[in-house]
Image (cartoon, rainbow, N blue to C red):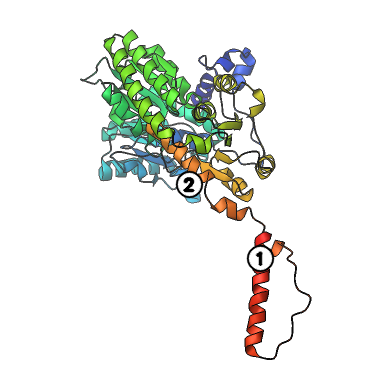
Amino acid sequence: MSSLRAKIQDVFNEPACEQNRRKDAKARKEGCSKPLTPGAAAGGCAFDGAKIVLQPITDVAHLIHGPLACEGNSWDNRGAASSGPTLWRTSFTTDLTELDVVLGQGERKLFKAIREIKEAYGPPGIFVYPTCVTALIGDDIEAVCKRAAEKFGLPVVPVNAPGFVGSKNLGNKLAGEALLEHVIGTVEPDDAGPYDINILGEFNLSGEFWLVKPLLDRLGIRVRACIPGDARYLDIASAHRARAAMMVCSTALINLARKMEQRWDIPFFEGSFYGITDTSEALRQISQLLVKKGADPEILGRTEALIADEEAIAWKKLAAYRPRLEGKRVLLNTGGVKSWSVVHALMEIGIEIVGTSVKKSTVGDKERIKQILKDDNHMFEQMTPRELYAMLSEHKADIMLSGGRTQFIALKAKTAWLDINQERQRPYAGYDGMVELVRQIDLAIHNPIWRQVRKPAPWDCQPAVREELPSTKSETATLHVVQEFAGTMADDFGEC
């Protein structure tokens, strides 16, 4: 536990973070995580954050050492996609019970589980995650993993991030530390080249990185390791031989990027594949870094030619949507890199941003937003559900882009909504992804259902009802009066 405490302090003291550098020594030791409010939704624990970063590594077994509920609550927490192996979709847990805890059977049960996974699946590696229960009772997972690796002849990686040590973001960083300590640099590739790069903090949600990778392939740039999206164990183990790196989500893995630069001289930059302009700029910076590391400068010309071709195609497709979306107002309730990259992408086609959340954004993210929006009033740290509902019900926005947890606020306010967080079902990265994002926004805003649900319900109307129906004697006359009365009521409701 003392080694974990030291590692947490090291992660908090992040020199690559501008905000952290401005703190005094005492403030840096306290870290960035804010105390959780009792009774409130915490947004994920450290264990959950570590699993988010590592589970998209598709060919390894992810073994959770703890009660069954810890695995059940964290399984499938990202919509990442795999182009091959499916082992990462299999749920492995030691399923500790009260009796196991009382009798001290945790470590023995963990060793047995590792052996069973090795014999049944033969993975290239096994990642072991302790949970609150197993950390509190003192199970030494590092010793068990070391012994199992020696016994069974395969890497067994302890991911020491039990839930109680901090927030989800801290778990992200501890997962990066586990990769640095036990995985990266353990395999020497025999095909390293001058055009190898790493992509860090890219999760391949809904397979969206597959919209970007063909662009890199056309430039002759090889992705040595995409961490963690659609990754393989051996790719990550040899990631230290890449020439450059792109950081997509610095909030999660900036410590990994910085330490890889220090240890193996892999320069990195933070960029985004959301939006046409940002995608083009990311391709330029990748090529420029490679040239600085010894690649042939001719790649710069090929990159500009590729960008010109792809931008022309994308803008031609987007031209059809501009008349329908120009001037539409969007409320963005998300965080991290999306708080500025998506803002920039939407403004490129004339959409107005009425607000964007910066709760999970870094200082750099916030500075980018200020430069893009030119107005701090459109940035908010946190907006309560009541405030979100008030803003939407007053028709201050035509659509809200957010995660699934706030979709019902928009639906209750009878406002269009589109999922842009990790649960989304469609890819929005790259040039084609930007066209798809705009298409989905257009479909959501112009869906005829909103015109229907915003009308008053028939029972809320007060039509002019006749005081007395004329009396008739024949069935034909009665039918005629009923039809006339029904027609009058229909006219009244229609006006309502």
Q: Which of 214 and 454 is in front in this view?
A: 454
Tell me which amino acid carries mark 1. Asp
- Place of residue 27 in the rendered image (x, y in percent of width and height, measured from the top left): 63, 18
Q: Which of 104 and 24 is in front in this view?
A: 24
Q: Is residue 408 above or below residue 381?
A: below
Q: Do the residues labelled 1 and 2 touch (CB within 8 Å)?
A: no
Q: Assign a secondary structure to mark 1.
A: helix
Q: Quadrant of residue 200?
A: top left
- Place of residue 280 in the rendered image (x, y in percent of width and height, measured from the top left): 40, 22
- Place of residue 429 in the rendered image (x, y in percent of width and height, measured from the top left): 41, 32
Q: In which quarter of the image is residue 42?
A: top right
Residue at 60% across / 55% down in the picture? 453
Q: Nearer the viewer, residue 18 or 162?
A: 18
Q: Relative to 336, is 486 on the left or the right?
A: right
- Of label 1 and label 2, which has the lower sequence position? 2
- Place of residue 138 in the rendered image (x, y in percent of width and height, measured from the top left): 50, 35
Q: Relative to 20, is 286 on the left or the right?
A: left
Q: Nearer the viewer, residue 309 or 65?
A: 309
Q: Mark 1 points at which residue?
A: 491
Residue at 26% across / 14% down in the picture? 194
Q: Mark 2 points at which residue?
A: 67
Tell me which amino acid carries mark 2. Pro
Which residue ends up furthest to the left in the rendered image? 190
